[in-house]
Amino acid sequence: MVRTKLILVAIASLLAVGSAGLWFLMSEEQEAQHRRATFFDSSKTYPTSGGEKMKVEW
């Protein structure tokens, strides 16, 4: 009886830790994709390295 409960608690703990780890990895991957999109898209919006739009001076 006690052994069965310990096995069930161990399985539940492993599932909880595994799902938390999987959620963390998925959220990190989404954040990385967002950073990549922002970084590569920023060169189109702000062509200068200073982050300011180019101003045409005549």
Image (spheres, grey):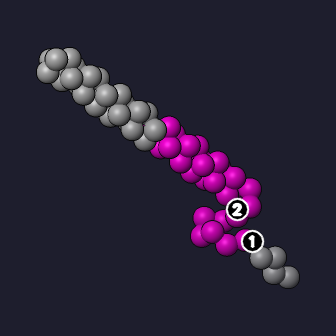
Q: Secondary structure at mark 1?
A: loop
Q: Which amino acid type is shown beneath numbered disc 2?
A: Pro
* Residue bearing mark 1: 54
The reply, left or right, for residue 52 in relation to residue 56 is: left
Kindly indicate the quadrant of the structure image that contains residue 22: top left
Give x and y (percent) for residue 16. Answer: 35, 34
Q: From which residue to which does the magenta span run?
A: 25-53
**Which tag, 2 or 1, sits closer to the chain's start?**
2
Q: Is residue 28 magenta?
A: yes
Q: Is residue 15 visible?
A: yes
Q: Residue furthest right?
A: 58
Residue 49's place in the image compared with 20, above or below, is below
Q: Is residue 7 left or right of residue 31?
A: left
Residue under the image location 35 percent in, 28 percent down: 15
Q: Tell me if label 2 and label 1 are in contact, CB under 8 Å.
A: yes
Residue at point 14%, 21% (across, down): 2
- The residue where tag 2 is placed is 47
Farthest-out residue, bottom: 58
| Residue 55 at x, y percent in the picture | 77, 76
Q: Position of residue 13 (x, y in %)?
A: 28, 31
